[in-house]
Amino acid sequence: MKVTVSRKAHFNAAHRLYRPDWSFEKNDAVFGKCNNPNFHGHNYDLTVSVTGEIDPETGYVVDVKILKDFIKSEIEDAFDHKNLNVDVPEFKNLNPTAENIVVVIYDKLKAVLDSNLVLEVTLYETPRNFVTYSG
Ligand code: NI
């Protein structure tokens, strides 16, 4: 019996979308207000879903406490109240679009979760704009 267990999380972060190898004009044309040189913030919401077999001994697919602690240590502690471009090494040379952020989050969680678990991450940049990655 495969069951999906989900946990919601949240972080606030600033970012700027731009490519340093493009002119300001080209960045402005492609990224618009998101190219503001002084950065801007989002309230990011996250749903982390883990699918796997129910362990017959514990009755768990995953201990939600462990999942919660991984989300805190890997994602919230690393991203919350940070400037993604400046403070988070993964985005030093990677444009912090929602698409790239969700892949980074997936990779960080995948590295610490039991490899038998199937992971899917949905990241909300706004209540209406969200991206999903499952590897
Ligand atoms: Ni933005």
Image (spheres, rainbow, N blue to C red):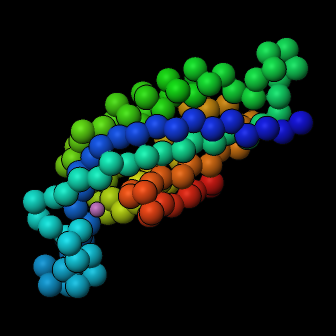
* Number of numbered discs: 0
The reply to whether residue 100 is visible in this rendering is: no
| Left or right of 34 on screen, residue 118 | right
| Left or right of 111 on screen, residue 75 | left
The reply to whether residue 25 is visible in this rendering is: yes
Looking at this view, is 11 or 115 the one in front? 11
**Which residue of the protein is positioned furthest toward the left in this rendering?**
38
- Residue located at (57% from left, 42% from top): 48
Residue 57 higher or lower than 23, as above or below: above
Looking at this view, is 34 or 90 the one in front? 34
Residue 22 higher or lower than 94, as above or below: below
| Left or right of 83 on screen, residue 80 | right
- Residue located at (48% from left, 60% from top): 130
The answer to which quarter of the image holds residue 67 is top right
Q: Position of residue 58 (x, y in %)?
A: 79, 15
Q: Position of residue 122 (x, y in %)?
A: 54, 52
Q: Where ligand 1 lies, by image quadrant? A: bottom left
Q: Position of residue 1 (x, y in %)?
A: 89, 36
Q: Position of residue 74 (x, y in %)?
A: 43, 33
Residue 7 higher or lower than 106, as above or below: above
- Residue located at (13% from left, 79% from top): 24
| Image quadrant where one finds the C terminus | bottom right
The answer to which quarter of the image holds residue 10 is top left
**Which residue of the protein is positioned furthest toward the front in this rendering?**
127
The answer to which quarter of the image holds residue 12 is top left
- Residue located at (43% from left, 46% from top): 45
